[in-house]
Amino acid sequence: MKTRPEPFLWLLFSAGGMAAALMIPVLLFLFGVAFPLDWISPPDHAHLYAVLHHPITRLVLFGLCVLALFHWAHRFRFTLYDGLQLKRFSALIIALCYGGAVAGSVVSAVLLLSV
C-alpha cells in the first residue's frame, strides 16, 4: 500500500489557516493602524530590535510564514483543480504551488536569520 502525503498537507493547511487567522490581523492592526495613528504609543526601535533578535520570536515568525504559505499553496491548488477544472495539469500545479511554498519558506528563513 502506497502512502500519500495528503493527510500531512491537510494538516499544514488547517494549521496555516488557524495561525494566519489569529496572528496576522493582530499584527496588521498594530503595525498598520494603531501605531501609525498614535492610538497606542509605538515601541521604540531599540525595543523592537531586541524583540526581533530573540530566537523564540524568530521561530514564531518563521512558523507563521511557513504555515501561511502552505495554507495558500493547498487552497490555490484546489482552486485550480475544482474552480478552473485544471486537473489535467496536476503534476505542474502541485510542483508550482508547493514548490512556491517551500521557496517562500526558504526566503523567510534567510531573511529572519540575516536580521
Image (cartoon, rainbow, N blue to C red):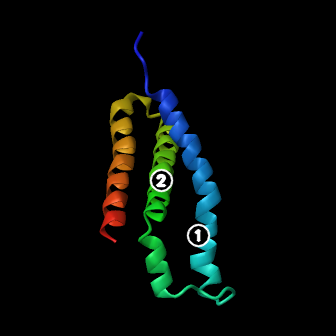
Circle number at residue 27: 1
Q: Nearer the viewer, residue 73 or 24?
A: 24
First in residue order: circle 1 vs circle 2: 1
**Amino acid found under the numbered disc labelled 2:** Gly
Q: Residues within 10 Å of mark 1 (few under 14, many from 20)?
A: few
**Quadrant position of the N terminus in the picture:** top left
Q: Position of residue 92 (x, y in %)?
A: 33, 36
Write down the quadrant of residue 86 in the picture. Answer: top left
Residue at 30 percent of width and 61 percent of height: 110
Query: In this rendering, would 52 be left or right of 23?
Result: left
Asked if 44 appears above or below 30 in the picture, the reply is below
Task: Name the one closer to the observer, 78 or 54.
Answer: 54
- Who's the residue at 44% across and 51% down the image? 66
Q: Residue 97, how many percent across, how many down?
A: 39, 43
Image position, residue 102 (x, y; %) = 35, 47
Q: Where is residue 115 drawn, in percent x and y? A: 34, 71
Q: 67 above or below 88?
A: below
Residue at x 32%, y 51% (from the top left corner) = 103
Q: Which residue is mark 2?
A: 63
Q: Secondary structure at mark 1?
A: helix
